[in-house]
Image (cartoon, rainbow, N blue to C red):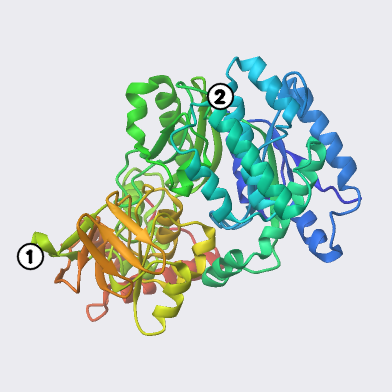
Amino acid sequence: MMTWIHPLSAEVEESAEVLGGKAHGLVVLRRLGLPVPPGFVISTRACRAFFRDGRLPSGLDAELAAAVAGLEAATHRRLGGAERPLTVSVRSGASVSMPGMMSTVLNLGLTAEATTALADETGDPRFALDSRLRFLSGFASEVLGVGRESLAAVERAIAGRRTDTEGLAEAIRDVERLVREHSGAPVPDDAARQLELAIAAVFSSWHTPRAKTYRALHDIPGDLGTAVTVQAMVYGNRGRRSGTGVAFSRDPNTGEGVPFGEVLFGRQGEDVVAGRSLTRPLHELTGREPEVWARLVDALGRLEAHYRDACYVEFTYEEGELWVLQVRPGRFVGRAAVRAAVDLADAGVIGRDEAVLRVSPEHLQHVRTPRIAVDDARQVLTRGLGACPGVAVGRVATTADSAVRLAAQGPVVLVRPETSPLDMHGLAAAAGVVTARGGPTSHAAVVARAMGKPAVVGAANLTVEDGVGVRAGSRTLSEGALVAIDGTGGEVVLGDPRVVSAATDPRLHRLLTWADEIAGPDPDGDEARRLTSARTVLLRRQETAEPDEHGA
C-alpha cells in the first residue's frame, strides 16, 4: 500500500524527489543535530495522485489524522485546542528549489477558540491577535483566492497599529468580512478542515501561472509535483526576544566567507522574503541576541562542512531559542561563485576538479562585473542596496504586465514597491529590477540572483505609481523613461551612462590555470572556452570512473 506521509526524522531515507527539497533539507538538519520544529511531509507522489484523480488521494485522510496525532503527542499540544493549542505551518517544497512560487500558510489551527487560549497561555493578547490576523490573511489569499490587493488595503489600514489590540481586532473583522464577501462563507473554524484545504491549495499552486513561468525559465519538468511540509509553528513575532531571518554562510554578492543575511525583530518569516518590511543586517544579532548569533554561526559552519558548499538557511528564534526552518545550497553566480569554489578548494574542502565543475561558463559572463561610472551626481535618481551584480539599461516599467508589454520594443527595468510571485512574468521579461522596499534576501533579490539579472533593492526614497511612473525626492519619471541600474553599488541612474569593466579577478585566473592543467593550455581560447574544455574532460572522466589527478 502506498505511503503518502513521512515523518521529519533523521531516520527517513527517502530522496528529495519524494520528500521535496525543503523536507529533505530538514532531515539533513536533524541528522546534524540542529534544532528543527517537529513535523511531517506529504510526498510528491501524493501531489501527482492529486492531479491525476482531481482530489486528495485515497488513504491520505487516515495517514493525516495519525500524523497530526503524533505531532500533538510530540508537542503536548492539540491542533486548534482550547488549551495549549498547536498551530502549524503548511509549506510547499518541490525537489528543485522554486523560491516563492508556490503557496504557504502559517499559523494554521488558530481558530477563534485557540486564539483566546494562546493569549491566555502567553499573557500576550497582542501576539495572539497578530498571529490570528496573519493566519486569516494567508488562508484567505492562498486557499480561498481573496485578492491580494484587498488584503493589502487592510494591512495598510493598520500600519503602525500592530501594538494596538483593538486595531488588530478591527483588521481581523475586516479580513473576515472580505472572506464572506468573496466566498459566501467564513474561514472554517475547524482546524482539521483548515489543514485539508491548505494541503490541497499547496498542491494546486504547482500549476499557478507564476510557477509555470519559473519552471519554463529554469527547464524544470512540469510533472514533478510538490511535497507539502507540515511543522509545528515557532513564533518570531512573539516579543522582543523573538525574530526571524535568512542567512548565507558566505556573502552571495562576493563569495567572501562571512555570514551574510537579514533579520527582522519581532516578526514572522514571510515579512523578510516579501520585502515589505525594513530588515536589519544579520550581524545586528550579535548585540541583541548573542547566543542566537553563536548558535546560528555554528549551524552555518556545520552545514557548509556537510554540503561542502555555501549554504542558505531560513531561521526563526522564539524567546531566545533558535530554530532552523530550511537549508539549501547558496547557488551563487559570477564572481561570488568563483570565489566560493576557489576558497573551498584552497581550504581542502573540495578538490580543484570539483571547483572547476562548480563554475559554469555562464558564470563567467558576470565575473568581470561592469559598473556604472557616475560622472555627475545629478545623474543618480536614487540609491538602494546592490542585490545582484551587473548593469542593466532599459525603460521603466512599473507593473509586471507593462514590463512584458514594453519589453517587446526593447530592454526594460521593472520598478516595484516590492515584488511577489505574482510578478514572475514581469521579472522574466525585464533586464533588471528595482524595489523601493526589501533587502538582499527579499523575493526580488533571490529571484534576480537565480536568474542572473542585476537588482537594486531597498531604494527607500522611491515611490512607485503603477502604470504611471516613479518619484524619487523632487524628481519624477514617467513609465518608459530610460534608466540604468548598478546591481553592485545600488545606483539607479538617469539615461544610458558610461559603463566600465571591473578589474581582473585573481581567483578567476587561478581557476583557469587549474582548467588548463586539466584540459591542456589553449592560448587562443577565451575564458569560457578554456573552462568548457576542462569541464568536458572532467565529465568524461566521471563517466569512465577515472581517478582524480588534480584534487587538492
Residue matched to label 1: 375
Horizontal side, residue 141 vs residue 292: left or right: right
Label whose residue precedes the other's in the sequence (2 or 1): 2
- Please indicate, yes or no, whether residue 117 appears anywhere in the rendered image: yes
Horizontal side, residue 410 vs residue 63: left or right: left
Where's residue 444, x and y in %?
Answer: 42, 56
Where's residue 358, x and y in %?
Answer: 42, 59
Which tag is nearer the camera, tag 2 or tag 1?
2
At 46% across and 21% down in the image, what residue appears?
Answer: 241
Q: Decide: few, some or many residues near mark 2? Use Cα within 10 Å; few <14, some 14-19, many ≥20.
A: many
Which amino acid, by three-letter code, is at mark 1?
Answer: Asp
Question: Which image quarter: residue 544?
Answer: bottom right
Where's residue 331, x and y in %?
Answer: 44, 55
Q: Decide: few, some or many residues near mark 1? Use Cα within 10 Å; few <14, some 14-19, many ≥20.
A: few
Question: Which image quarter: residue 427?
Answer: bottom left
Residue that extends furthest to the left in the rendered view of this protein: 375
Q: How far apart in space, not on screen, are marks 2 and 1 (Cα)?
A: 51 Å
